[in-house]
Amino acid sequence: MDALDAAILGVIQGLTEFLPVSSSGHLELGKAILGDLSVPEESLLFTVILHFATALSTLVVFRKDVWEILSGLLQFKWNEETQFSLKIIISMIPAAVIGVLFESELESLFSGNIIFVGFMLLITALLLWLADKAKNTGKSVSYSNAFVIGVSQAIAMLPGISRSGATISTSVLLGNDKTKAARFSFLMVVPLIFGKIAKDLLSGELLHSNVGFAPLAIGFVAAFLAGLAACTWMIALVKRSKLSWFAIYCFVVGLIAIIFAYAQ
């Protein structure tokens, strides 16, 4: 992998991790269009590095929130920060269970099934359109909401379903404040990303990387910077009810994917 490939993949990961367009879906489409030649699937380490970069960018954007949460937890009291942390844990349960029990089944879906990706993108478009029409409120995420949003996150493990799009849309449709919905959506995925990184490290698979230090560093920086921009931009878009833009985009790309698959 050269430096340009690493930079491009880093930017794509950083943008699609936060923008509601499905990073996994776009990866599958890219693999199909490029004939699987330009995507370095041989390097799990590179993928892990990119996900670490986007998780780090989330922590930077929400650094004040993270600091308040950690400070509140260290007080060892039943305060707002402890309750928020518990909601994050509840939201992680569905994706963690599905990821452990159905890992091989999920991996089988990432095999160039473009028709499936296309239809999932249409579902993402519908969710975004519905959420964009919902009225803004001042309501915070409840415990039951956290579990339902977690179910959406688990469903978003399917290629073509946007994780941020599904979780934010579900939260908003449940009547939660749009800004708070985006905040919860981005923070809830951080523990899962670090958990996945820890799992991959413990498995020893990362030791078999054939990617040099320079591409890894370039990919990390590109994903981190793109993640910072996308995360900040996405919060502003959700607050201003601009999700319909992405609904249109996902709808168009979904249709193109389906037509492309049938035309082959």
Image (cartoon, rainbow, N blue to C red):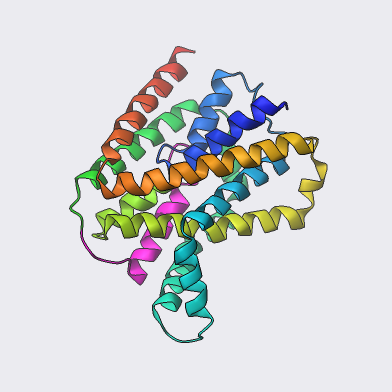
Residue 89 point in image, percent of width and height: 49, 68
Which quadrant of the figure has residue 44? top right
137 left or right of 211? left
- Above or below: residue 123 compared with residue 94: above
189 left or right of 119? right
Please tell me how many numbered marks the rendered image carries. Answer: 0
- Above or below: residue 44 compared with residue 31: below
Quadrant holding the N terminus? top right
105 left or right of 201? left
Q: Which residues are magenta?
A: 137-161
Residue 111 point in image, percent of width and height: 59, 31
Residue 158 point in image, percent of width and height: 48, 42
Residue 173 point in image, percent of width and height: 25, 54
Closer to us: 70 or 168: 70
Q: Residue at x 55, y 34 (%)?
A: 11
User: Is 147 in the magenta?
Assistant: yes
User: Is 1 in the magenta?
Assistant: no
223 left or right of 138? right
Q: Residue at x 40, y 41 (%)?
A: 20
Q: Residue at x 71, y 52 (%)?
A: 200
- Above or below: residue 23 compared with residue 257: below
Which quadrant of the figure has residue 21? top left
Given the current orientation, which residue lies at the most extreme top position? 263
Q: Would residue 158 be visible to someone looking at this image?
A: no
Q: Residue at x 56, y 28 (%)?
A: 112
- Above or below: residue 77 compared with residue 262: below
Q: Would residue 248 be visible to someone looking at this image?
A: yes
Closer to us: 186 or 127: 186
